[in-house]
């Protein structure tokens, strides 16, 4: 596990709602489950980050994440399209992607599964539950979950 070997952990948070992003960031940092959280606000920038294009060509400043937290309703490129692109890419497909969204629509859940999301989590409406969820997600995905070996 990266956190046991001293390697920094990186989470890519793709979320256009600033309040939700702040809750995620606080929840993860309060539990010290990540050394670095990269927050991107739209799908186009997310793909640029992941494929090291545009403003994100410096791989030292913009490393591949250990985990992607992905909202579905994003500007420019929809979260489902981001998910599909990530999981179709041989270089990215092993990165765990947790869909973290307010949508509990069956079609969104089905498409996320079709596109190989590693998990689908509906954001709770109340602050306390949302904060606990972020802590639990961080511990699970960055602590307990066995990570695949990169290609």
Image: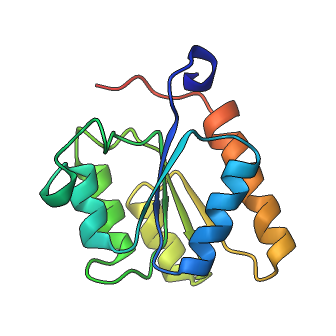
Would residue 31 be found to the left or right of residue 21 on screen? right
Instruction: Spot the residue most to the left.
Output: 54
The residue lying at 63 percent from left, 18 percent from top is 4
Would residue 80 be found to the left or right of residue 6 on screen? left
Would residue 124 be found to the left or right of residue 6 on screen? right
Q: Position of residue 5 (x, y in %)?
A: 57, 15
In the depicted structure, whether residue 97 falls above or below residue 149:
below
In the depicted structure, whether residue 86 falls above or below residue 10:
below
In the rendered image, the quadrant that contains the C terminus is: top left
In the depicted structure, whether residue 47 falls above or below residue 62:
below
The residue lying at 27 percent from left, 51 percent from top is 50
The answer to which of 44 and 83 lies nearer the viewer is 44
Q: Position of residue 78 (x, y in %)?
A: 33, 78
In the depicted structure, whether residue 134 falls above or below residue 144:
below
In the rendered image, the quadrant that contains the N terminus is: top right
Q: Position of residue 38 (x, y in %)?
A: 44, 54
Q: Position of residue 136 (x, y in %)?
A: 76, 50
Quarter where residue 111 is shown: bottom left
Instruction: Spot the residue most to the right.
Output: 128
Would residue 111 be found to the left or right of residue 8 on screen? left
The residue lying at 18 percent from left, 58 percent from top is 55
The residue lying at 38 percent from left, 72 percent from top is 79
The answer to which of 85 and 136 lies nearer the viewer is 136
Quarter where residue 33 is shown: top right
Q: How is the image coloured?
A: rainbow
């Amino acid at each position: 596990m990266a956190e046991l070997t001293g390697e920094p952990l990186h989470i890519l948070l793709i979320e256009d709602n600033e309040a939700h992003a702040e809750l995620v960031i606080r929840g993860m940092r309060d539990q010290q489950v990540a050394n670095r959280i990269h927050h991107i606000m739209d799908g186009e920038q997310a793909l640029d980050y992941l494929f090291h294009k545009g403003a994100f060509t410096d791989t030292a400043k913009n490393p591949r994440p250990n985990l992607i937290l992905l909202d579905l309703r994003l500007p420019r490129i929809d979260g489902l399209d981001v998910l599909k692109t990530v999981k179709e890419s041989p270089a990215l497909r092993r990165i765990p992607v947790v869909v973290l969204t307010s949508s509990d629509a069956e079609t969104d859940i089905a498409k996320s599964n079709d596109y190989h999301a590693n998990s689908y989590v509906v954001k709770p409406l109340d602050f306390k539950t949302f904060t606990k969820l972020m802590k639990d997600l961080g511990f699970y995905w960055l602590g307990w979950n066995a990570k695949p070996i990169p290609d």
